[in-house]
Each structure stands twice: as structure tokens, then as C-alpha cells.
Image (cartoon, helix red, strand yellow):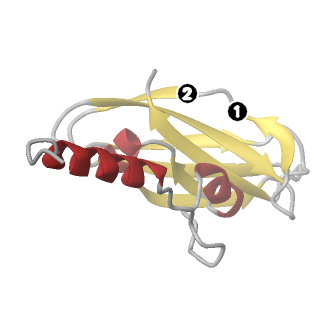
Amino acid sequence: MNMNLFPLLAVTVSAVLFSACRTTPSPDAPQEAGKHDLEATEKFVLMDPGAQHSVAGLHIQERTLDDGRLEVVAIIKNRENRRIQVQVNCVFKDAQSISTGDETPWETLILTENAQEAVKFTSMNNLAKRYTIRVRQAR
């Protein structure tokens, strides 16, 4: 075999071997929680990397109104030294964390540098016992 062809042959064989290898995660390996998992268990969810970097949920206050509806007030803070625009909504759920079909429309919130603002949501009926406030970058 010509010695000039040996490096080319070695590279080709290596490429074939490595391209044929595929890693599959073990069933025992921990899985990354998706946003839907968080929405099922958390009261406040930052839905995208931009919101995760720029926004903080400082405080959430909840109360049941006289007619049985749930009212939620969240204090949302801009963690940046620049003005940001986000969208916020609330999904109301029953005691088993299943959506009652009562979801508020997305509300645009403009936060100036390091500002914080209160956002209030009220359920449409008395089925709501839990909720998830969702925040995403404005579209």
C-alpha cells in the first residue's frame, strides 16, 4: 500500500466509525424538566431564556373573593439596566392542578430599568384553586 494513501484511509475509517456511533440516554438518566412540567407544578414560570435572564417574580399574593373566585397579584421585577417588554398571563387550575379552561389573555408589560410592577389576575369562576403565572418575552 502506498504510504501517501495511509493517512487518507485512516481519516476515512475514523469518520465512518464515529458517524455510526450514536448515544442514547439511559432510562435511569435524569431528564431535563420541560416548560410544561414546570407549568404543572409552579406558580410562576419564566417561559424562555430572555425572560429567565431579565425577569424575577418577587412576590405573589392570592386571595379568594366573596363569590369564590381566585384573585392573584404578582410583583414582577426587571433585573436589567434597560427597558424590557414582556407578556404575562395566568392559567387558573382546579385543586388537582388541571386547567379549568380559564386562561387570561397575554398582557404586555413594559418595565423600565430595574422597575417592578404589580399585575392582577382574577378567575372567571369559582373552580380555580391553583394557578400558574407565565412570563415570556414580548413578541
Residue density around tag 2, few if under 14, some if 14–19, many if 20 or more, within 10 Å: some
For the residues bearing labels 2 and 1, Cβ distance under 8 angstroms = yes
The residue under label 1 is: 104
In terms of depth relative to the viewer, which is nearer, 14 or 53? Answer: 14
Name the residue type under label 2: Glu
Residue 20 x/y as whole percent: 48, 51
Locate residue 123, reporting x and y percent.
78, 42
Q: Is residue 137 visible?
A: yes
Looking at the image, residue 63 lies above or below residue 2: below
- The x and y percentages for residue 115 are 28, 42
Q: Can see residue 56?
A: no
Q: Nearer the viewer, residue 87 or 6?
A: 6
Tell me if 114 is positioned left or right of 77 in this view: left
Residue that numbered label 2 is attached to: 107
**Pick the front one: 33 or 18:** 18
Query: Would you call the spot at circle 1 few (<14 residues within 10 Å), some (14-19), or many (20 or more)?
Result: some
Residue ID at (24%, 30%): 83
Looking at the image, which residue is at 25% across and 33% down?
Answer: 112
Q: Which residue appears farthest toward the front when viewing the image?
A: 1
Q: Which mark, by number, is residue 91? A: none
